[in-house]
């Protein structure tokens, strides 16, 4: 691929505008207006653009992944809150000066309790596990009873007629 074609491709990746990219790469105004679409039809240029776009998408995915919290990090933060190791920023107005101040304070009891409850949802106690096992057994028994009832068929071989003949 020639240098001018590479400049066109790089500019096209930035702007998405064929004509403007051709002009920026050094092609004439006439060529840019009437023939620049042929540059995108060029196999070499198209392959280069596809490679560069894939590289850009790969970098974005990596940046996005590094920005997402995993479960371990989330539990670590909840644990720090529950243990009182994380301070909370509070914005208050100073009654004397009237100025707004930012102060750091320890998490209050409500916040600590919420953090502990969130952790316990993920790690049930022995008593909660036992309760879940009993609930599962009860549901299995209920399912078995329902299946037995479904298998029972009642055959009616006589018709009862009421006083009106129905």
Image (cartoon, rainbow, N blue to C red):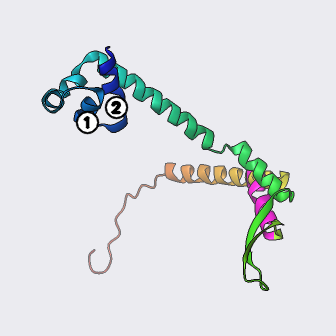
Residue at which label 2 appears:
11
Left or right: where 77 falls relative to 148? right
Counting from the top left corner in percent of width and height, residue 166 is at: 28, 74
Say which quadrant the N terminus sits in: top left
Q: Which residues are magenta?
A: 110-124
Where 80 sits versus 9, above or below? below
Residue at which label 1 appears:
20
Question: Residue 136 lies in magenta, yes or no?
Answer: no
Cα distance between the residues tagged 2 and 1: 8 Å
Q: Looking at this view, is 66 or 33 the one in front?
A: 33
Q: Looking at this view, is 125 or 164 the one in front?
A: 125
> How many C-alpha atoms fall within 10 Å of the one at disc 2: few (<14), some, or many (≥20)?
some
Q: What is the chief secondary structure element of the magenta stretch?
A: helix
Where 142 sits versus 1, above or below? below
SS for tag 2? Answer: helix
Q: Quadrant of residue 30?
A: top left
> How many C-alpha atoms fall within 10 Å of the one at disc 1: few (<14), some, or many (≥20)?
some
């Amino acid at each position: 691929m020639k240098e001018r074609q590479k400049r066109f491709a790089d500019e096209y990746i930035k702007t998405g505008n064929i004509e403007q990219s051709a002009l920026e790469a050094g092609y004439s105004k006439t060529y840019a207006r009437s023939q620049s679409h042929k540059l995108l039809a060029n196999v070499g240029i198209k392959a280069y653009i596809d490679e560069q776009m894939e590289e850009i998408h790969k970098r974005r995915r990596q940046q996005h992944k590094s920005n997402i919290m995993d479960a371990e990090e989330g539990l670590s933060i909840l644990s720090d809150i529950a243990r009182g190791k994380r301070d909370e920023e509070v914005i208050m107005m100073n009654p004397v000066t009237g100025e707004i101040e930012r102060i750091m304070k320890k998490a209050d009891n409500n916040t600590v309790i919420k953090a502990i409850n969130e952790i316990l949802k993920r790690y049930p106690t022995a008593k909660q596990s036992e309760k879940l096992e009993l609930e599962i057994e009860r549901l299995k028994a209920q399912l078995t009873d329902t299946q037995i009832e479904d298998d029972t068929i009642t055959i009616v071989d006589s018709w009862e007629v009421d006083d009106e003949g129905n």
